Image (cartoon, rainbow, N blue to C red):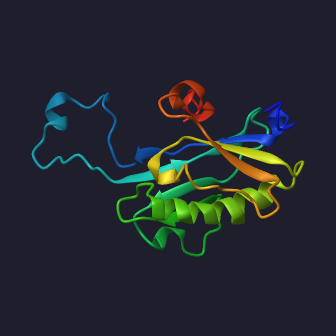
Amino acid sequence: MHDLNLTPVQVYNADESGLLWKVLPNKTYVSRKEREAPGRKVSKDRVTIMPCANTNGTHKLKLLLIGKARSPRAFKNVDLPLVYKSQNKAWVTKEVFRSTKEWFHNDFGPEVRRLPPKALLILNNAPAHGPNENLASSDALIQTLFLPPNCTPLLQPMDQNVI
């Protein structure tokens, strides 16, 4: 951070997490007989979310949401405070992350430029992120840094109880 002449306001982190949005809670006030009623099936409908914020938490970007539907009916004619992408299993894959490059250039970049224009986005080295690819703005003022393998839970801010 100091080598690049960046302040905590200019350093961002993004990380994805799966969200099983239809799963009932494990602990509930329903009796055990009701939870074991015939026909009760555990729903595994999931989406992937990717929050992104700067180091000191003063700038939080719109949440990236990856779902299965290409254009969900519930989102029709609604201005949502999120960026939506689709993938048939709602996972982050290389194809989805290439769409996330779209997010990088169309959402992250313009939003970050409202503050001091130079910025760094820290990502984990998941294969879907393509850590060997150089992801930067066309003027190179906004760049990415991929964390080394096997240390992400220790170093990545979004893994430190943000998600």
Task: Count all numbered tags in the image, as a single digit.
Answer: 0
Is 26 displayed left or right of 37 in the figure?
Answer: right
**Residue 84 appears in view:** no
Examine the rendered structure and indicate whether residue 154 appears above or below residue 103.
above
Dividing the picture into quadrants, the one containing residue 133 is: bottom right
**For the view shown, which residue lies furthest in the front direction?**
132
Q: Viewer-proximal residue, 144 or 116?
A: 144
Q: Viewer-proximal residue, 64 or 35?
A: 64
Q: Which quadrant is home to the N terminus?
A: top right
**For the view shown, which residue lies furthest in the top direction?**
154
- At horizontal 77% and vertical 64% (from top left) the residue drawn is 138
Q: Position of residue 29 (x, y in %)?
A: 30, 28
Q: Position of residue 24 (x, y in %)?
A: 32, 40
Q: Position of residue 101 (x, y in %)?
A: 61, 62
Examine the rendered structure and indicate whether residue 4 appears above or below residue 110.
above
- At horizontal 65% and vertical 58% (from top left) the residue drawn is 81
